[in-house]
Image (cartoon, rainbow, N blue to C red):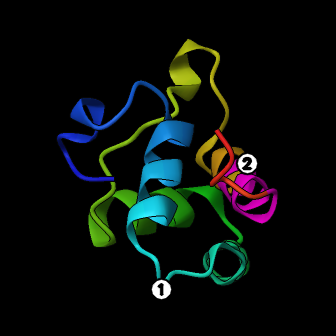
Amino acid sequence: MHQDWGFEGERWQDLVRNFTNSETTVDPSSVANEIDGLLADFPEDAGLRDQVYRVLGCYYDPRPDLGGPSVRTWLMEVADFLRSGPRRA
């Protein structure tokens, strides 16, 4: 999710849905499996945050400081959303 993600939707679900709808060759289950791999590769939350924000350049923050989920929980939610069929509105 690039720095202007807010122009493409109000919630992360909108962005994931837009991505899967526009990228017709993308298999949502495969992306979910890649997220699972990322979670497994970085069992420590600090390392996962660093990978997601610094290395991968994600600009979306679930705002755990404001009661939102941790990055790990959010990524698990994204993977579940992908598996549930995000193309449905």
Name the image quarter holding residue 46. bottom right
Q: Nearer the viewer, residue 18 or 6?
A: 18
Q: The residue tagged with tag 2: helix, strand or loop?
A: helix
Q: Nearer the viewer, residue 30 or 55?
A: 30
On screen, residue 8 above or below 52: above
Q: Left of 77 or right of it: where is 84?
A: right
Which label belongs to residue 25?
1
At label 1, counting other C-alpha atoms closer than 10 Å, the crowd grade (few under 14, some 14-19, many 20 or more) is few
Image spot of residue 65 (x, y percent): 53, 20
Q: Nearer the viewer, residue 72 or 47?
A: 72
At label 2, counting other C-alpha atoms closer than 10 Å, the crowd grade (few under 14, some 14-19, many 20 or more) is some
Which label belongs to residue 77?
2
Disc 1 from disc 2: Cα separation: 22 Å
Q: Nearer the viewer, residue 88 or 2?
A: 88
Image spot of residue 83 (x, y percent): 79, 64
Specify the principal SS of the magenta part: helix
Image spot of residue 52 (x, y percent): 43, 62
Image depth: mark 1 or mark 2 in front: 1
Image spot of residue 30 (x, y percent): 66, 84
Range covered by the magenta-colored residues: 76-84
Residue at 56% x, 40% y is 13
Q: Left of 74 or right of it: where is 11?
A: left
